[in-house]
Amino acid sequence: MPEHHKVKVISIGEIQVHPNADTLGIVFVGGYQCVVKKDNYKVGDLAIYLPPDSVVPQTKPFEFLWADKEFPDGVVPEKYRRITVRRFRKEWSEGLLLPLSDFGQMVHARSFRVRTKGEAWPRDLGRLPITDLESLPRGGTFSFSLVGEGDDVAELLGITHYEEPEPVDLYGTPSTRLQEKGWPRSLRGWFFLILRALGLRRNPLEGTSERAPKDAPPVYDVENFKHYNTTFKQGDEVVVTEKIHGSNGRYMFDGKRMWVGSKNLWKSEKSKCIWRRVLKDYPQIEEWCRAHPKNTLYTEVVPTQKGYDYGTNEKNPTDIFVFDIRDQDGVYWPKDKSLVEIKPVPIIYAGPFDKETINKLAEGKTLVTNAKHIREGIVIASHEERYERGLGRVQLKLKSNAFLEAEGKR
């Protein structure tokens, strides 16, 4: 259930008055609101909307994002290219809106035929993104269309979706990390690299990975509520749980052995990673899995994110929260199914859907006992399991704007 990240061309509708600034306006894009300079747009203009957690490439149209920064090696770190949430004169601006005209002429080439060595060579490209008509090969016949309202231009512009970094495979092998991050740039970096090479310092997020089990459960992700803000109707029965800011984990007993995985990888029995540590710290996980073979526990393990300890301490250094269960036939357990043996994610609300109420539930402090930080957000699910075409399971996440704003300042 991967999240689908889209960067669409939209037509500017109503530009609402900003209550605290004469030169600013507010434009709504689906469930998102963007603060814009009123003079930059008029109704009917085409613009590109980049939702929060978009990561832009290091190209000219986006240079204003890091114009006040200097980078000795000329490479702009991802954190400066990540679109988040900000407040302008006390109003949230969720994502980024840019005029389509900022990007020049863009086309989607649907197909082309190129002559090679005197012979016709047809090739169907689907929708090939092209930003410059001059880049089209010579000697061919093309069919193309200009980019317009409703088009997804993420691939065309090289815009990707931010993902929490997947822990490095094969920790203790410095060459693996060097391939991804390069050589250390300080004496302190070299010091810790040597400690890691000697096995004296380890990152709990790392660990030796292994081949996926047969019939492995899928990677788990949930679409954003603001992309699908009309999915739930007023009065629909929903269950709202807290979204925990940890690291996604999977636990399953296949009838022969216990399998432990992160969001994308499977961790070997020799691994010293936090997912294996949690399995050791909480034997009830394996007990439950053995009692329910081929059922998968989808969990968040903590603490893995800076500033979000969820009440863990030296005495209790790890914790786990179960947010879903999938049986061997791919059927998910009811959201309100009691898990006496294992800690579930906190349920914030169960009852009829109301958009204003739901938006407020995304904000505030975590409900986890002894934790003092804010919540990451919420997950809204239909009380009765149902599916919708184009979406899949009817459950959507809504991140806290306060959380996204804090992430943008890190």
Image: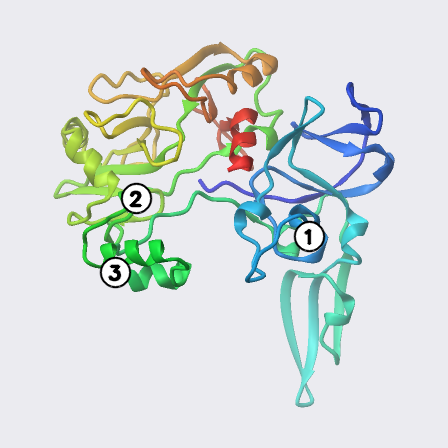
- Distance between the alpha carbons at the discs numbered 2 and 3: 14 Å
Earlier in the chain: of badge 3 and badge 1, it is 1
Taking depth in this image into account, of 58 and 43 the one nearest to the observer is 58
Asked whether residue 220 is in view, the answer is: yes
- Residue corresponding to mark 1: 63
Residue type at numbered disc 1: Glu
Q: Mark 3: which secondary structure?
A: loop
Query: In the drawing, does residue 123 fall left or right of residue 192?
Result: right
- Residue for point 51% across, 16% down: 361
Mark 2 Cα-neighbour bin, 10 Å: few <14, some 14–19, many ≥20 = some
Taking depth in this image into account, of 222 and 113 the one nearest to the observer is 222
Please identify the quarter of the rendering in which residue 252 is found.
Answer: top left
Give percent across and percent down for residue 77: 53, 52
- Residue corresponding to mark 2: 205
Give percent across and percent down for residue 14: 82, 28
C-beta proximity under 8 Å, tags 2 and 3: no
The image's colouring method is: rainbow
Asked whether residue 214 is in view, the answer is: no
Q: Which disc is residue 198 wearing?
A: none
Q: How many marks?
A: 3
Earlier in the chain: of badge 2 and badge 3, it is 3
- Residue for point 41% across, 62% down: 182
- Residue corresponding to mark 3: 173
Q: In this view, does 156 lie above or below 64?
A: below
Q: Which of marks 2 and 1 is in front?
A: 1
Q: Mark 2: which secondary structure?
A: loop
Residue type at numbered disc 2: Leu
Query: In the drawing, does residue 352 fall left or right of residue 342?
Result: right
